[in-house]
Image (cartoon, rainbow, N blue to C red):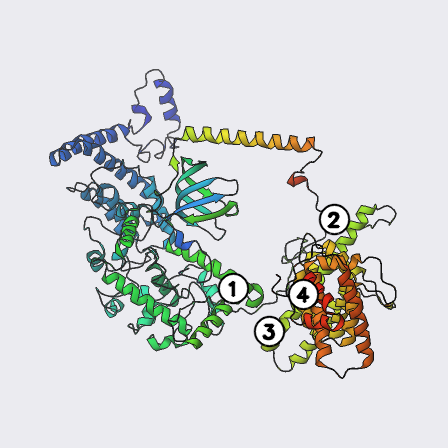
Amino acid sequence: MNYMPGTASLIEDIDKKHLVLLRDGRTLIGFLRSIDQFANLVLHQTVERIHVGKKYGDIPRGIFVVRGENVVLLGEIDLEKESDTPLQQVSIEEILEEQRVEQQTKLENEKLKVQALKDRGLSIPRADTLDEY
Amino acid sequence: MFRYESLEDCPLDEDEDAFQGLGEEDEEIDQFNDDTFGSGAVDDDWQEAHERLAELEEKLPAAVSEQTGNGERDEMDLLGDHEENLAERLSKMVIENDLEDPAIMRAVQTRPVLQPQPGSLNSSIWDGSEVLRRIRGPLLAQEMPTVSVLEYALPQRPPQGPEDDRDLSERALPRRSTSPIIGSPPVRAVPIGTPPKQMAVPSFNQQILCPKPVHVRPPMPPRYPAPYGERMSPNQLCNVPNSSLLGHPFPPSVPPVLSPLQRAPGFVGSPLAAMNPKLLQGRVGQMLPPAPGFRAFFSAPPPATPPPPQQHPPGPGPLVQNLRSQAPMFRADTTHLHPQHRRLLHQRQQQNRNQHRNLNGAGDRGSHRSSHQDHLRKDPYANLMLQREKDWVAKIQMMQLQSTDPYLDDFYYQNYFQKLEKLSAAEELQGDGPKKERTKLITPQVAKLEHAYKPVQFEGSLGKLTVSSVNNPRKMIDAVVTSRSEDDETKEKQVRDKRRKTLVIIEKTYSLLLDVEDYERRYLLSLEEERPALMDERKHKICSMYDNLRGKLPGQERPSDDLFVQIMCIRKGKRMVARILPFLSTEQAADILMTTARNLPFLIKKDAQDEVLPCLLSPFSLLLYHLPSVTVTSLLQQLMNLPQSAAAPAPSNPHLTAVLQNKFGLSLLLVVLSRGEDLQSSDPATESTENNQWMQVMFMATRELLRIPQAALAKPISIPTNLVSLFSRYVDRQKLNLLETKLQLVQGIR
């Protein structure tokens, strides 16, 4: 906002630590080093953070170049408040395991739901097969 | 290795004869020419070279260990040595055309001298390349990248422990960037990222800007006098021999952008042509080109932490261009600035001045800022993105904002700021509170250029290229639209198509509505002679809107309600009708209202999910106040579905029931009743026929109302106050009470 009031620009965000949420659901945390007009990002010392419940695990990833269209949102991380979180950090193996378990339970629940509906003669069509009248 | 002048000396035993024979035969032809065999073919006496190297290596560790006794060092300096050779070789590869440059040759030779410096761990690596770079100073910027590559080619230093005192960023920087002072932002007197195109006087530079004399920094041309001018007066700097201040070869893309903008009158928003704080400070009597000035302005705050928002309202940024570049630069020149901008710039300078004054002492900003600045200072990877690159991105963003019609292209922004300005104007009127400064981005108003697309043509060719591009699309497929006959389609499809058609009509009508709503603004902006034309257009559009709503079917007495009902079944249609109503004439609007009343139960049923009908209440009420008594009477009839004659009471009135059970229906009914009452009471001298009609209808109405069971009545949006008096005319006390309770007309009951 320094340069151009009323606009959104990433220029002031450079060299600051950011949290970036991607379209595929991944969360990246890194220092924003460079941008361009498409909001392609260059993240430095990037860490992919996986959240499961109250726990999270960090996977160090190095340098990331993110194509701008895949970014859902990004925000600056306040370095002082960064450690001030109720979440608990765990090891990578543990968090990956937790994530796998979570995915599994979700799938199972989904299956049960679909089965129950089928028993009642209802079916929820999948979003991609919906035909707009 | 084997340096033999001729092959005869070669001590080959077996083939001696043969070779000799050969030699004798071809003595005229120098087959064994110099290039291959003679002095020209000086192949590296690699053995000797290796020997030399080994000697050096032995010597050096010895020398160094004498000096420091640090075993680790040996490796370091060995590396340094290797790097030197490597650097030398690389430099030879790179600067082929400059080999005759005596400066360079000298530099290469002098490098070993720099090497054994006591206490200079880093210098062996960094100084070498820095020296190179210094020499390269006068060269064009394009060659800078090669230097960086060179530096990157140097083997990595293993990270050092005892180097905390050193500013890591200062160490990291020379590898890549050409700007020297990034590591210590507050100390910066020269902006970041200005590619050093020219050699400048390095002496004061080093003193002032380099706190650590060990590092030989590439000299920054002091093209911009420090905006905070504590250390040297701008006049001094100006008088420094600096053609760099003028005629700075800007990146080629910039001038074309500047020139059309320069032609634009008034404010021109361009990131490149920003306020030069120097201009405002009015210190320099010399012209500065706007472009470098922009950088000076920008680089001052951003690499440091941007000041917290409460202290510093958004800066003016690249909003002002000093168009009259020949004009002298003093403060008065800023008169063409928007007053807000000028104030903001002034504030900004103040702030920056303060910032620098408080630099070493305790800043106002407290520990937060300083810790953040420390963090920046320690970040060795900071400013990988050069200021120039940032400006480039900003420039692109600004270019995207250029428009011929900002109201059209940037509607929400314009509206937002209009609202804010109205608010602040209102606040100002109320009291003299602290005026909040709001900066507004002023984008350049670029005249729309009509581009006539001309297809690519080559000189002297016979035909034209048939190239299809975005400007010149070509038909690729011959797609023929075939509409199927009615019989083929199933009912579902027909319904679907009808719905689609209705949607299309709604969309078209909505566009018309938006245009009509916009006419007021256009009217204000237009010239006198254009206004009648605008009014005509507006009327025409209103007519078409109405036709769309009611279904334009010429030749029919009254078009069917069908289209209207269809539109009203769709949520967007209802909202649209609510917005259109104010624009319609009274008759047209009354017609709409009647149709709505007539079909109300159906609409109510369809509205069950959306619940949007209540939005129609307010325009309807407004309309009602303009309607004459007759209309109101018939409207009431319609609403309650009362039979035409008072004679036979209908068995049941599901129409009315439905109406009463719906919030909108009930509210509308009440409003209609109220209006009727108003008309009756206000105008006693009305025609008796109308009166009679009204009386009849009211009787019927009250009868109906009394009849219906007090089922779940809806809660109306508003209850008009004169209903009690209305009913009291037509019913006796007892029934009045009944009515009151039923319709909950009396406030107390609720």
Q: Are marks 3 and 4 on the same chain?
A: yes
Disc 2, SS = loop
Give amino acid for label 4.
Answer: Leu
Specify the quadrant of the image occupied by residue B573. bottom right
Residue under numbered circle 2: B477
Of badges 1 and 2, nearer the viewer stands 1
Disc 3, SS = helix
Q: Which chain carries label 4?
A: B
**Crowd band around label 1 with a 10 angstrom C-alpha radius: few (<14), some (14–19), many (20+):** some
Q: Can residue B326 be seen in this view?
A: no
Give amino acid for label 1.
Answer: Tyr
Residue under numbered circle 4: B617
Of badges 4 and 2, nearer the viewer stands 4
Give how far apart the Cα atoms at labels 3 and 4 are: 27 Å
Measuring from the top left, give residue B515's x and y in whole percent. 66, 68
Is A103 drawn above or below residue B624 in the view shown?
above
**Crowd band around label 4 with a 10 angstrom C-alpha radius: few (<14), some (14–19), many (20+):** some
Of marks 3 and 2, which one's residue comes earlier in the chain? 2
Between B215 and A65, the residue placed more toward the observer is A65
Measuring from the top left, give residue B158's x and y in whole percent. 27, 35
Residue under numbered circle 1: B413
Give how far apart the Cα atoms at labels 3 and 2 are: 44 Å
Q: Can residue B605 be seen in this view?
A: yes
Direction top: furthest residue: B14
Of marks 1 and 4, which one's residue comes earlier in the chain? 1
Of marks 3 and 4, which one's residue comes earlier in the chain? 3
Whether residue B449 sits left or right of residue B504 in the image: it is: left
Residue contact between numbered discs 1 and 2, judged by CB atoms under 8 Å: no
Is B328 drawn above or below residue A102 in the view shown?
below
Residue under numbered circle 3: B521
Whether residue B539 sits left or right of residue B131 in the image: it is: right
